[in-house]
Image (cartoon, rainbow, N blue to C red):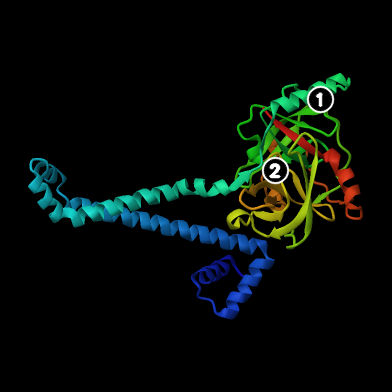
Amino acid sequence: MKSDLELTNQIEAYLRGELSSAEQAEFDQLRASNPDIDHKVVEHQNFTKQLSEYGNRRQLAANMDAIHQQLDIIGLKDEVLPKTVQIRNLWKKYRVNTAIAASIAMIAVLSTMLSTGYFSKTISTNYSALRREINNIKRSQNALIKNINNKPVKGPSDPGHFGGTGFALSSNGYVVTNYHVIKDADSVYIQNTKGESFKVKQVYVDPAYDIAVLQIVDPNFKTLPSLPYSFKKATSDLGENVYTIGFPRDDQVIGKGYLSSRTGYDGDSVAYQVDIPVNPGNSGGPLLDNRGNIIGIISGKQTQSDGAAFAIKSKYLLKALEAIPKDLLEDKLVLNKKNTLSNLSPTDQIKKLQDYIFMVKVY
């Protein structure tokens, strides 16, 4: 087992291209088999990039100060304004310095735009989070139909503003969804497959991993039976068959596909890429393998590529849960470790899962 210092030195040599071909291949294999090492490499790469950008900005500022001291701005203004000939002469005299100053100013502006993520806003338009804007007309019609059929409608009649998906973490009312689904919400409800709505409160959020943990606080809620699924810690294999259940509309929708990459959008090591058709409303839905293990949480898709969806790895969900301060949990949050889905057919797995998947309604 290497010490942290030895590992850091090896990562730096790897990133600088100082390893031999054999060492490079060995380290690539280590990254592929050990997600923690891969995550450390990405973090170190980002850290050194930030240091380099900081050094470049400091050098740029020093260069601009030096050039600014060489220019007599007031003298230029007094001499240039009166006569056209003087303007031409001054331009010939100072055009080199002026061009340099303008170039440096342009570089400074571009650096600022890059460091603040200006360009990434344009680039990231190719990534779409999957929170759904609820169609008030359809939701109102559905509520009317339920009333006509004399079915009791529990919870608010207002259909809400946004929707997503969530699923049970425990039988005593803890639920998880994406942070972007409930961000800036005044209140949040979840709805089960029977049409019953329950008020929930926000317990903990982790914006970095796009995870939100909720707790049902509705007096009408009854404890669920033991969860049939467990949460997978290890990285799943490429090509593995996976499926998800979500609410891109008012009814549960099943999506099936396979795991197409161990990294998410733009090489994000926190997420998987999966070849599954998803739509707004799928955010927060569980991603399961064919043995019924939770391996991730659906979070977004690539808009310009059919079937390229992304899911936060269950490993980072577990990390977020471990980080919850104990005083925020009114009841114990104990994850199920027994999987009762593994020997069932896909159809029977889905039947057992339905009562643990919820529509998230944001107001």
Residue 192 is situated, as x and y percent measured from the top left of the image, at 82, 33
The relative height of residue 282 versus residue 148 in the rendered view (above or below) is below
Name the side, left or right, on which 46 lies relative to 169. Answer: left
Q: In the rendered picture of this protein, how many numbered marks are placed on residues?
A: 2
Tag 2 secondary structure: loop
Locate the N terminus by quadrant. Answer: bottom right
Name the side, left or right, on which 146 lies relative to 82. Answer: right
Tell me which amino acid carries mark 2: Asn
Residue at the (38%, 58%) spot, across then down: 55
- Is any part of residue 153 visible from this angle? no
In terms of image quadrants, where is residue 280?
top right
- Is any part of residue 346 visible from this angle? yes
Residue at the (82%, 36%) spot, across then down: 172
Mark sitting on residue 87? none
Q: Nearer the viewer, mark 1 or mark 2?
A: 2
Asked whether the beta carbons under mark 1 and mark 2 sit within 8 Å of each other, the answer is no
Callout 2: 10 Å neighbours few (<14), some, many (20+)? some
Tell me which amino acid carries mark 1: Pro
Locate the C terminus by quadrant. Answer: top right
Of the residues under marks 1 and 2, which one precedes in the sequence?
A: 1
- Judging by the rendered image, the residue that carries numbered circle 2 is 279
Q: Mark 1 to mark 2: distance in Å?
A: 32 Å
Residue at the (63%, 39%) spot, across then down: 180
- Judging by the rendered image, the residue that carries numbered circle 1 is 219
Tag 1 secondary structure: loop
The relative height of residue 57 versus residue 78 in the rendered view (above or below) is below
Name the side, left or right, on which 204 lies relative to 190. Answer: left
Residue 132 is situated, as x and y percent measured from the top left of the image, at 67, 36
Residue at the (10%, 41%) spot, across then down: 78
Residue 27 is situated, as x and y percent measured from the top left of the image, at 61, 72
